[in-house]
Image: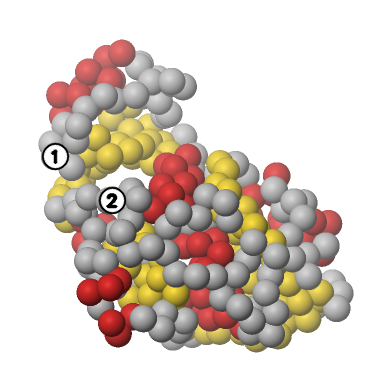
Amino acid sequence: MKLQQKPQNKLRHVATSPYKDLYIYYLQGRLKSGKEIFQENFIGNWEEDNFSFLFFSSPARHSVEKLLRTQPQLTYLDTFHMSYDQWQSERFTTIKHGKFCIRPAWEASVDQNPNFDDKLTIFLDPGVVFGTGIHPTTCDCLKALELATATRTLSTVLDLGTGTGLLALAAARLGCQKSLAIDLNLLAAKTAKNNVCLNELEDKVLVAQGRAEDFIDCPAELVIANIHYDVMQNLIRSQGFLQKEGFILSGLLRSQAKSVANMLVQFPVKVIKTWTHDGIWHTFYGKRC
């Protein structure tokens, strides 16, 4: 199998260093379409159901108060202050995982680290989005991707719940010609698109914002879903899922994994391998029979 060439050592889009502190303003309601907070310390808006989390790199009480006066559909709930490392659970630094080297975009270039010469390098600027390769489910998805490409090169991959875009980028580094990365959260989709540009893989990876259920019918050889359990149940029951040659399902707790396994036995698919981390997190790799 011929692997994709590594990226140029000099990044086209240079990312800034990670944030030191995060100031998060928790609001009920969603910002009106087209409304922006035009301030240098504004990082982004994470929307979840009917709630908004506004991220700033420094205190922004006055800006939030002004926003609340101009958008009465919003209600202030709380404020949180934490370090960037606390938000990401731990400090994000270079990770060597299987064939991959996952590197913060603000760290030194690969040519200054000869120990990484045999790795497929992925640069990431996660911002405030999760998916740096640290979490067990992400690690296991990378293992499953390597297994899926051990004897062949995939031409198309569908990555549902892409987060930072890491798994779609990993597929591209393993030789996949076209990956479609989907996330319902707009901030995640923007972050993933930025990471595609950081790695100069715009011709290999396309990012879109939307519901996973609306994209499961897109043609692809392999579907990756490291996603909420409720969404995964809908995906497995869909005709689009059964049309895929292979699947990677992750982000599952023990009881959820048992339920998914019971669902899969009802369909013409075969689970090739499972991964379990500390008896808590579960990942499936399988193929259509």
Above or below for 150 versus 59 = below
Badge 1: how crowded within 10 Å, few (<14), some, or many (20+)? Answer: some
Figure check: 38 above or below 142: above
Residue 250 in sight in this render:
no
Quarter that holds the N terminus: bottom right
Question: Where is residue 106 shown, x and y percent of the image?
Answer: 24, 58
Residue at 35% from the left image edge and 17% from the top image edge: 71
Identify which residue, 268 or 208, lies in the foreground.
208
Q: Secondary structure at mark 2?
A: loop
Q: Nearer the viewer, residue 153 or 21?
A: 153
Residue 248 visible, this angle: yes
Q: Which residue is mark 1?
A: 58
User: Would you identify the image quadrant in which residue 27 lies?
Assistant: top left
Q: Nearer the viewer, residue 212 or 169?
A: 169
Indicate the amino acid at tag 1: Ser
Residue 10: x %, y % from top left: 31, 59
- Upstream in sequence: badge 2 or badge 1: 2
State yes or no: discs 2 and 1 in contact (Cβ < 8 Å): no
Residue assigned mark 2: 14
* Kind of residue sitting beneath label 2: Val
Quarter occupied by the C terminus: bottom right
Residue appearing at x 27%, y 14% in the figure: 69
Q: Secondary structure at mark 1?
A: loop
- Judge whether 200 appears above or below 256 on screen: above
Counting other residues with Cα less than 10 Å from the Cα at mark 2, is it few (<14), some (14-19), or many (20 or more)?
Answer: few
Q: Residue at x 42, y 64 (%)?
A: 7
Residue 115 location (% of width, % of height) = 30, 85
Residue 126 position in % (x across, y down): 35, 55
